[in-house]
Amino acid sequence: MSRQASKDTAVELAVRRLLHAAGLRYRVEYPVPGLPRRRIDVAFPRAKVAVLIDGCFWHGCPEHATHPKANAEWWRTKLDRNMARDRETTEHLVAAAWTVLRFWEHEDPAEVAAQVLEALHGSR
């Protein structure tokens, strides 16, 4: 598990490159206001737009999530807690007037960047 990337994944880097090429500047691993130890993958603090790119295994993707057979109960509890924490983080940010954009790691980075651009231009 220690070799599993938790930040700067290939998808995150691809999305960030596209956003940067579009002339946008952003914050990486931005702390969630009011929730310690939680981070926003790509944040636009002035516009209050949070971009979160979730891994299929860790966050329970309905298409690609797998369920380990060894120690299955422990893993189910762990992954359920991750999904509950995701919901709590989203609700907290929305309550603080942030626009939250969540994507799966398997989504096309160009489409993700396009949706982020659309959200940012709509918030101005």
Image: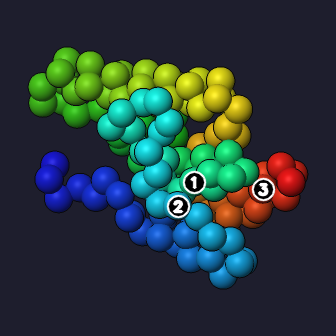
Considering only vertical position in the picture, is 93 above or below 101?
A: above
Name the residue located 62 percent from the left edge and 51 percent from the top edge. 45
Q: CA distance from mark 3 to mark 2?
A: 14 Å
Which residue position holds label 2? 27
Q: Is residue 23 left or right of residue 66?
A: right
The circle on residue 43 is: 1
Which residue position holds label 3? 120
Mark 3, secondary structure of its residue:
helix
Q: Is residue 83 visible?
A: no
Q: Is residue 119 visible?
A: yes
Quarter residue 5 falls in: bottom left
Looking at the image, is mark 3 or mark 1 earlier in the sequence? 1
Mark 1, secondary structure of its residue:
strand
Name the residue located 38 percent from the left edge and 64 percent from the top edge. 8
The residue carrying pointer 3 sits among few (fewer than 14), some (14 to 19) or many (20 or more) residues within 10 Å by Cα, namely some
Q: CA distance from mark 2 to mark 1?
A: 5 Å
Name the residue located 36 percent from the left edge and 33 percent from the top edge. 36
Residue type at mark 1: give it: Ala
Residue 28 image point, x, y percent: 47, 60
Residue 22 image point, x, y percent: 72, 77
Residue sitting farthest toward the bottom: 21
Name the residue located 47 percent from the left edge and 70 percent from the top edge. 13
Whether label 2 touches label 1, CB < 8 Å: yes
Looking at the image, is mark 2 or mark 1 earlier in the sequence? 2
Residue type at mark 2: give it: Arg
Residue 33 image point, x, y percent: 50, 36
Residue type at mark 3: give it: Leu
Q: CA distance from mark 3 to mark 1?
A: 11 Å
